[in-house]
């Protein structure tokens, strides 16, 4: 009996020693990561510092205040959208919807891309509206400044405030760019939503998009009028996520002549599988009603 007790004591001490080693390793790693973040935040490379600041602000990192001031964090999110500048659109009668998966193990993100969508098959909904009967749906954040769904209009801010807006008219053309609420509300849009960035305008990717690394969604339109949707998930620690510039390049690669970025939230939903819409109570979903190949 005494030998069994001794063995148990030895086993307990061994497990305690392993636990202490793991805990000490974790503390050292966290300290190293914090030190690396501090070096990036306060180092000579301003572009990397700005990127880290924007990443912390977008992901609402709780300890961001240790590295950046409240003004720096707020400024990293500011964006003045360009005036609307559509690419050349010539609506087609024949669209072939296709699903593409991008999963590169060396990347900080993976993505789902849907191309060839008819403008008639895409709708904006609150939370889970229309998702259960949809072929595909993307969960979007509820943290938006303005949106239009049919005759319903919601906004925050002043009446004359300029929004970065993305909206679909009954002509099937996606309008993206700077708009006041009055302009947006009186344009007869079927749906519209304020977005984070104009990625592509007039057929060319935008420059100086700023921002950090994050999960993102995007909507764009090709020259034949078909819509393109992208839902990108972040992966890893840092960098973790896709930048606006990478998202613009991806949209351009798939043929977009105009495109906008929206904050992704929730999951990608396909054929009845996936999380319905957004995580938040006030979230949105971009819904694809048509079928796909």
Image (cartoon, helix red, strand yellow):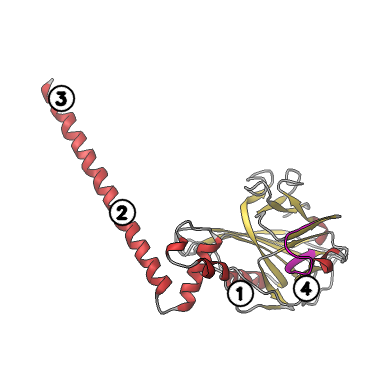
Q: Is residue 101 visible?
A: no
Crowding at mark 1 (Cα within 10 Å: few <14, some 14-19, many 20+): some
Q: Which residue is mark 4?
A: 223
- Magenta stretch in the rendered image: 154-167
Sequence-first disc among 2 and 3: 3
Tell which tag, 1 or 3, sits nearer the viewer: 1
Foreground pick, 222 / 200: 200
Q: Are marks 4 and 1 in contact (CB under 8 Å)?
A: no
Crowding at mark 2 (Cα within 10 Å: few <14, some 14-19, many 20+): few
Q: Which residue is mark 2?
A: 27
Tell which tag, 4 or 1, sits nearer the viewer: 1
Residue 47 against residue 10 in the figure, above or below:
below
Sequence-first disc among 4 and 2: 2
Cα gap from disc 4 to disc 1, whole angstroms: 23 Å
Residue 96 against residue 206 in the figure, above or below:
above
Q: Are marks 4 and 2 in contact (CB under 8 Å)?
A: no
Sequence-first disc among 4 and 1: 1
Residue 4 is labelled as 3
Tell which tag, 4 or 2, sits nearer the viewer: 2
Q: SS for tag 4?
A: loop
Foreground pick, 213 / 4: 213
Residue 133 against residue 28 in the figure, above or below:
above
């Amino acid at each position: 009996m005494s030998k069994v007790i001794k063995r148990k004591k030895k086993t307990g001490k061994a497990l305690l020693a392993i636990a202490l080693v793991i805990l000490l390793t974790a503390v050292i790693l966290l300290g190293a990561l914090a030190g690396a973040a501090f070096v990036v935040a306060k180092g000579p490379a301003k572009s990397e510092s700005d990127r880290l600041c924007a990443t912390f602000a977008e992901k609402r990192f709780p300890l961001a205040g240790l590295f950046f001031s409240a003004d720096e964090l707020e400024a990293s999110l500011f964006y003045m959208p360009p005036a609307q500048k559509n690419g050349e659109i010539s609506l087609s009668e024949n669209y072939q919807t296709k699903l593409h998966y991008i999963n590169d193990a060396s990347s900080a993100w993976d993505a789902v891309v849907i191309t060839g969508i008819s403008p008639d098959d895409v709708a904006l909904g609150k939370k889970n509206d229309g998702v259960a009967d949809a072929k595909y749906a993307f969960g979007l954040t509820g943290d938006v400044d303005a949106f239009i769904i049919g005759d319903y209009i919601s906004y925050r801010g002043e009446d004359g405030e300029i929004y970065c807006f993305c909206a679909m008219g009954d002509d099937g053309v996606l309008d993206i760019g700077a708009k006041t609420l009055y302009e947006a509300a009186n344009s007869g849009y079927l749906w519209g939503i304020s977005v984070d960035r104009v990625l592509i305008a007039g057929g060319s990717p935008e420059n100086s998009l700023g921002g950090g690394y994050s999960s993102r969604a995007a909507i764009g339109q090709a020259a034949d009028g078909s819509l393109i949707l992208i839902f990108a998930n972040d992966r890893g620690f840092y960098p973790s996520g896709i930048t606006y510039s990478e998202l613009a390049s991806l949209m351009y690669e798939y043929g977009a002549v105009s495109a906008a970025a929206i904050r992704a939230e929730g999951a990608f939903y396909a054929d009845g599988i996936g999380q319905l819409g957004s995580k938040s109570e006030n979230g949105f979903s971009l819904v694809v009603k048509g079928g796909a190949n």
